[in-house]
Amino acid sequence: MRALAIALAATGLFATSAASRTQALHLVPVAKFSAPVYATSAPGDAGKLYVVEQAGRIMVLQNGATRPTPFLDIRPLVKSGGEQGLLSVAFDPAYATNHLFYVDYTDVNGDTRVVRYRSNGSTAIPGSARQLLFVKDFAGNHNGGQLQFGPDKLLYWGNGDGGGAGDPQHNGQSLARPFAKIMRLNVRAAKPFWRLVAYGLRNPWRFSFDRANGDLYIGDVGQGDWEEIDYVRHGSSGLLNFGWNRFEGRHAYDSSTPLLGRGPYRPPIVEYDHGQGCSVTGGYVYRGKAVPAAAGRYFYGDYCSGTVWSLKVAGGKARGVRREPFKVAGLSSFAEDGNGELYLLSLNGDLSRLGG
């Protein structure tokens, strides 16, 4: 019996100590904001957390207190509500010296813009704005909006299929327009231009790179039945096809849509049905020090049900998927600070930190 218990524990099917560590995880309330949708730290300044509010402000949290003056306030430029608004911010890897940062927002006409700003080290300089991308949108949803610098120091941007049920514009399996895509930009180039990285994504609302190894995780919002997490190991080369709208999750959605042959089809590493939620919120691999029980686990959740799960990847597959013992109503995003600590944001206003 002892040998059987050891064998089961090794496979992750039975482990009392793992269960007790799971129960130790909890959320620590940190602060409240107005409809927060994203947060991050700037390189070289782990003591501050920059919190993106959907209406068009970025607020600064430092030592548990929110600075009264916004870091950025572009509310007159932003159309906010539903899936629109100021959606994310990414700080240049050399921010400590060049003070450059990048935002994605929906403008007053409902179109998507990616804009570079410079700060004075404390607040943004409004006149420094330089547009890097403009996308004319035909609907108000499936806007993606995530900006992240990858391990290659390139700026990555995600966009959904443009809106409408079932991808009516057939953008998922098309390379003609910048919808249903992840693209990247060399911001240091004299004449930067966007390069395609992946397609076949319905709405990659949140994606992230593991700070320890560079692996890419994508939370792709599904249609009516399935939500998915996609995974790309660092060092993978070539274009990737995540299958929408031929597939929703691992399941056929529109069998009349052929998969494009540009790059291999990549099925999700994990999925869940709409009995457990309705809109996946991708997160981060925990690399902080405050919660050893969470080390190396990728956290993600669902906006509708508030359920939070975590998993580990081994051999390119999801292992040890588990439901965490807490929920976040209106889970809009996860966030990672400069020390690798994990935060969870609610569209209702709450910012919490993972504790254990």
Image (tube, grey):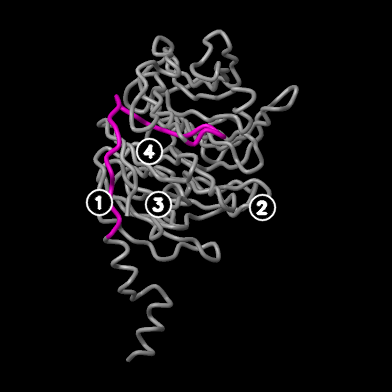
Q: In which quarter of the image is the N terminus?
A: bottom left
Describe the element under mark 2 as helix, strand or loop: loop
Q: Do the residues labelled 3 and 2 touch (CB within 8 Å)?
A: no
Q: How crowded is mark 1: few (under 14 residues within 10 Å), some or many (20 or more)?
A: few
Q: State the separation of the CA atoms marked 3 and 2.
A: 29 Å
Q: Position of residue 113 (x, y in %)?
A: 52, 20
- Residue in view at x 40 percent, y 45 percent: 342
Among the two numbered marks 4 and 2 on one chain, the one whose residue lies closer to the N terminus: 2
Give the residue type at disc 4. Ser
Identify the residue position indicated by label 3 in the image: 290
| 31 in magenta | yes
Q: Quadrant of the C terminus?
A: bottom left
Give the residue type at disc 3. Ala
The answer to whether 219 is drawn above or below residue 82 in the figure is below
Among the two numbered marks 1 and 3 on one chain, the one whose residue lies closer to the N terminus: 3
Q: State the separation of the CA atoms marked 1 and 4.
A: 15 Å
Q: State the separation of the CA atoms marked 2 and 1.
A: 34 Å
Specify the label residue 326 is tagged with: 1
| 209 in magenta | no
Q: Position of residue 244 (x, y in %)?
A: 48, 45
> What secondary structure predominates along the stretch shown in magenta?
strand
Describe the element under mark 3 as helix, strand or loop: loop
The answer to whether 80 is drawn above or below residue 145 in the figure is above
Q: What stretch is highlighted in magenta?
A: 24-46
Q: Are marks 2 and 1 in contact (CB under 8 Å)?
A: no
Q: Where is residue 330 in the image (x, y as percent from the top left)?
A: 27, 37
Identify the residue position indicated by label 2 in the image: 235
Identify the residue position indicated by label 4 in the image: 333
Point out the frontmost of discs 1 and 3: 3
Give the residue type at disc 1. Phe
Front residue of 261/294: it is 294
Describe the element under mark 1 as helix, strand or loop: strand
